[in-house]
Image (cartoon, coloured by chain):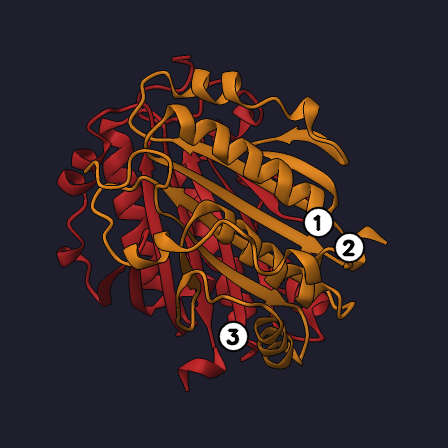
Chain colours: A red, B orange
Amino acid sequence: MNNYCGTSRIAGCQFTLYPMSDNFVDIILSALNEVDTSKVWKDTDDVSTCIRGKMVHIFDVTKAIFLHAAKTGEHVAMSGTFSIGCPGDTDADVYMDETDHPLNEEKAASINQQAGCKFALYPMGREDYMDAIYEQIDLSKSRGVEVSHSHYATRLDGDVHHIFRAMEESFVSVQEVVSHVTMTFSISANSPSNK
Amino acid sequence: MNNYCGTSRIAGCQFTLYPMSDNFVDIILSALNEVDTSKVWKDTDDVSTCIRGKMVHIFDVTKAIFLHAAKTGEHVAMSGTFSIGCPGDTDADVYMDETDHPLNEEKAASINQQAGCKFALYPMGREDYMDAIYEQIDLSKSRGVEVSHSHYATRLDGDVHHIFRAMEESFVSVQEVVSHVTMTFSISANSPSNK
């Protein structure tokens, strides 16, 4: 169970991109085409995509796919679950040898996109899991995002880069003190309800 | 913290319906229009909808919304998180006085719709959470669904009624032994990848 303990534990994300458009196939394929996924293990079916590898690349790839889809101007959403330390994981070990340099940051950096996002952190196997959440997460330090609370989730509003950075920082903080952590998220851009 | 212990604890679901169509607004509104949500507390914003109340109505409403959207024949998906026993919950207590009769089952029963769904159960605050999952869930008894396993999730394929019944049975079983349980799901129908 301790195969991945230490500084480079394998992380993953099971996610789906949802373009609310007749052109959803093109939007998904062109977003994927613009994103370099060579540093993560990847598996896609008709329900979702799973990527696995180093944390830095998991966040880099999911953010880039969302940004390249959202820049079409269509109403697009993405939801999924980040996970680290799940007992029993073995696939994709080879991707842990990749360097930490994110492949998509440079190209994605120029895309300015506002979004709304709800996320929730679940530290597993700890009786004091609520304390782990409260102690580790200080979203007041998250620059560029407006933080609000709703049932079962925390809402972040702002630029997509800032939203993903706040989520990544929260996830990284909690997994430093809890072995198995999952984090659900649902992010939405260009919604007509928001105009 | 024990306000809701016993036979009628308040449950909830934070979910989003995603029609992959230019007509997404109409599909969402017409699905909502066909579903009776009067037995649950409901709050919607541009990212997601949250409903709260008795477990039976939470599953009844989410399934009915998905079915009424999917029957349009468009590629539609829904993802979300069911939750029960979250410490600190208070809203929507009044809805716990409703009877157990599901309001949408009769109308929804006639809709036959195949789908694929990935779900994951998270029993919170228990060091033996993996055991809680394995002991309580016996999907081999779930009629009408094909069960397979993927990273971070269990996949169910079959009729939407059977899929939701399998998820509800799993959720009900685990919350009987663990106070705070969440369950993520992502369900997809009419995907062109599946034809």
Residue B167 makes an appearance in the image: yes
- The residues bearing labels 2 and 3 have C-alpha atoms spaced at a distance of 33 Å
**What residue did someone put label 3 on?**
A71
Q: Nearer the viewer, residue A135 or B6?
A: B6
User: Quick one: SS at disc 3?
Assistant: loop
Q: Nearer the viewer, residue B2 or B159?
A: B2
View extreme (bottom): residue: A195
Residue B113, numbered label: 2
Could you tell me residue A96's position as x and y percent?
A: 47, 28
Give the foreground label among 2 and 3.
2
Q: Are marks 2 and 1 in contact (CB under 8 Å)?
A: yes
Residue B21 appears left or right of A134: right
- The residues bearing labels 2 and 1 have C-alpha atoms spaced at a distance of 6 Å
Chain letter, disc 1 residue: B
How many numbered discs sit on the rendered protein? 3
Residue B27, numbered label: none
Please determine whether, in this image, residue B112 is positioned above or below residue A169.
Answer: below
User: Quick one: SS at disc 1?
Assistant: helix
Q: Residue at x 70, y 42 (%)?
A: B162
Q: Residue at x 61, y 46 (%)?
A: A49
Residue A69 appears left or right of B122: right
Chain letter, disc 3 residue: A
Could you tell me residue A57's position as x and y percent?
A: 45, 43
Q: Nearer the viewer, residue A110 or B179?
A: B179
Residue A152 appears left or right of A188: left
User: Quick one: SS at disc 2?
Assistant: loop
Amino acid, disc 2 = Gln
Residue B160, numbered label: 1
Mark 2 Cα within 10 Å, few/some/many (few <14, many 20+)?
some
